[in-house]
């Protein structure tokens, strides 16, 4: 098998939570589908989910949409039943969904953190445990958790000068925890054929206020924010046999942000 063949995902079933998301989710779905996988996008936004899946199928890709509420373990159980009945056992699980209510340190409350924990901690654990069952049975699988640069380094408050933007502290907390949970999974299940890795993207351009964009780009070694294409190669690499000896890794896709 040649090296390019190892990136091929033909015959693989991939599930992407938050797979229709306008930030990373839709790019991740597109990458896996372009590499040949059958992809199930799972999201609370059923209208966007269905529309995006229809567009991708029209382009010849095997993409399907199913509902998921990451804060509800019953919804996660229902999704597993639906996916295995309609598509088969999941080979690739990408945890991209995130919940949050925004606000800075002054605005957030214990209730804010409890809501965040229900989706970003309990939901993440439930997704991994639920869909790992089939992987362990077949002794094969790849879990990819989408963390953040703010899971590795603290946020830089100077980036937000001149804007009303604030970095939610719960986001930093859960993204850092996600990285070490990924290492736990990698060590606990590596000998059973299941790999677990993290991707830590940098800031995604989403039409933020100009002062923020300029300050971010000035600090970033590559000199720009992340776009739709930047995360695709990392996802396909970690999902595929090209990374067969990679587990427990935290892959920075940040334009050199954390190298400073």
Image: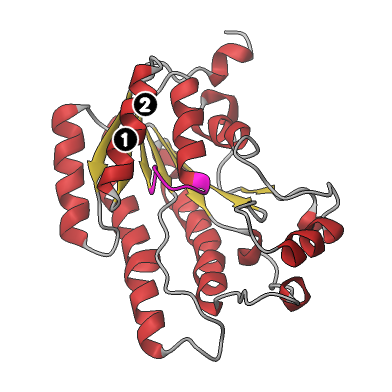
Picture quadrant where residue 61 is located:
top left
| Above or below: residue 162 compared with residue 210 | below
Residue 167: quarter of image:
bottom right
| Residue 151 at x, y percent in the picture | 61, 65
The residue to which callout 2 is attached is 55
Q: Secondary structure at mark 1?
A: helix
Q: What residue occupies the far top of the structure in this picture?
A: 1
Viewer can see residue 7: yes
Query: Residues under labels 1 and 2: Cα distance?
Result: 6 Å
Image x and y of residue 242, in percent: 59, 25
Question: Against 143, is 44 above or below?
Answer: below
Residue named by callout 1 = 51
**Residue at 34 percent of width and 21 percent of height:** 57
* Residue 218 in the figure: left or right of residue 141: right
Q: Can residue 132 be seen at all in this image of the molecule?
A: no
Query: What's the residue at 42%, 60% (across, down)?
Result: 98
Taking the magenta stretch, the answer to whether it contains residue 82 is: no
Tell me whether circle 1 and circle 2 mark residues in contact (CB < 8 Å).
yes
**Picture coordinates of residue 91, whole percent (x, y):** 36, 32
């Amino acid at each position: 098998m040649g090296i390019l063949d190892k990136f091929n995902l033909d015959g693989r079933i991939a599930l992407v939570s938050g797979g229709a998301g306008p930030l990373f989710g839709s790019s991740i779905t597109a990458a896996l589908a372009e590499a040949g996988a059958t992809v199930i996008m799972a999201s609370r936004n059923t209208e966007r989910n269905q529309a995006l899946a229809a567009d991708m199928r029209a382009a010849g890709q095997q993409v399907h949409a199913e509902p998921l509420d990451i804060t509800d373990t019953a919804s996660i159980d229902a999704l597993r039943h639906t996916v295995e009945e309609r598509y088969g056992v999941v080979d690739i699980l990408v945890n991209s969904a995130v919940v949050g209510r925004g606000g800075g340190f002054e605005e957030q409350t214990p209730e804010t953190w409890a809501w965040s924990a229900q989706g970003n901690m309990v939901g993440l654990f439930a997704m991994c445990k639920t869909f790992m069952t089939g992987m362990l049975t077949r002794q094969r699988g790849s879990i990819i958790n989408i963390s953040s640069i703010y899971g590795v380094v603290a946020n830089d408050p100077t980036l937000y000068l001149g804007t009303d933007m604030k970095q939610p502290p719960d986001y930093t907390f859960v993204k850092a925890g996600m990285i070490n949970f990924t290492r736990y999974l990698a060590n606990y299940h590596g000998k059973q054929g299941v790999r677990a890795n993290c991707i830590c993207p940098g800031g995604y351009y989403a039409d933020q206020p100009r002062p923020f964009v300029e300050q971010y780009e000035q600090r970033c070694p590559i000199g720009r924010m992340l776009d739709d294409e930047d995360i695709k190669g990392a996802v396909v690499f970690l999902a595929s046999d090209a990374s067969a000896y990679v587990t427990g890794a935290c892959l920075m896709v940040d334009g050199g942000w954390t190298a400073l």
